[in-house]
Image (cartoon, helix red, strand yellow):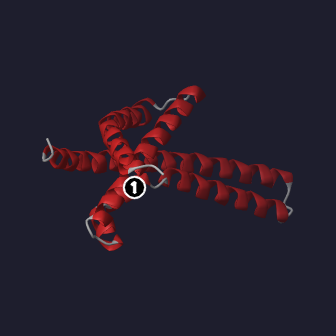
Amino acid sequence: MLNSEFWNKVERYNSKLIPFCIAILLVIIILEVFVHPEDEQIKLMLKFADIIVISIFIIDLLFLYKRAHEQGHDNKFFIKKYWLDILAVLPFGLMVQGIGRTAIAVTAAEQVTLGQGVVHESIELGKAASKTEKLAKIAREVKVGVRVTRVISKSINLRRFKRNIAKYF
């Protein structure tokens, strides 16, 4: 069984990574808003970096949860105090993309089952492609919004953490 000293070290190292994660998120936001990378390798690297950042933020949220319960607070208090952090780690971009893909698949399946002509099918698929582009744009905007939320929430918590840590040194 791992001791609490180990978890204290994990928490300290994780909290030291948060400023770097904020910087990485800012770079990702700038690239997605202003550059719109089209290269698949760059997109994959950005997605990987985003996953790493979210993982670090989730670990931080778990430690915040643990600390709140150690101080005798309930879940309601935790949600009220850290609602922005909770929102920041939810994968809204993936949810929007999933909903969009499901809607397009349902639309295409409906068109096929109705047995309409080939010409009509191609027109409908063109409309579905247009919907896909719109949903991709919405998903990108939602992802940027969520990343901005992460930056804001972790910046606030970083200041709180520094004040709390200063008490011990």
- Residue 59 image offset from top left, x and y in percent: 41, 49
- Marks counted in the figure total 1
Q: Which residue is located at x 13 percent, y 47 percent? A: 167
Q: Quadrant of the C terminus?
A: top left
Q: Which residue is located at x 49 percent, y 53 percent? A: 91
Q: Which residue is located at x 33 percent, y 73 percent? A: 76
- Residue 87 image offset from top left, x and y in percent: 39, 58
Query: Which secondary structure lies at badge 1?
Result: helix
Residue 39 placement, left or right of 156? right
Question: Three-letter amino acid code at disc 1?
Answer: Leu
Residue 44 placement, left or right of 72? right
> Where 40 sits versus 77, above or below?
above
Q: Which residue is located at x 56 percent, y 32 percent? A: 44
Residue 157 visible in the snapshot: yes
Other-residue count near label 1 (Cα within 10 Å), few / some / many at <14 / 14–19 / ≥20:
few
> Where 74 sits versus 111, above or below?
below
Quarter holding residue 84: bottom left
Residue 39 visible in the snapshot: no
* Nearer the observer, 119 or 72: 72
* Nearer the observer, 4 or 76: 4
* Nearer the observer, 119 or 37: 37
- Residue 15 image offset from top left, x and y in percent: 31, 42
Residue on which the image places disc 1: 62
- Residue 26 image offset from top left, x and y in percent: 34, 36
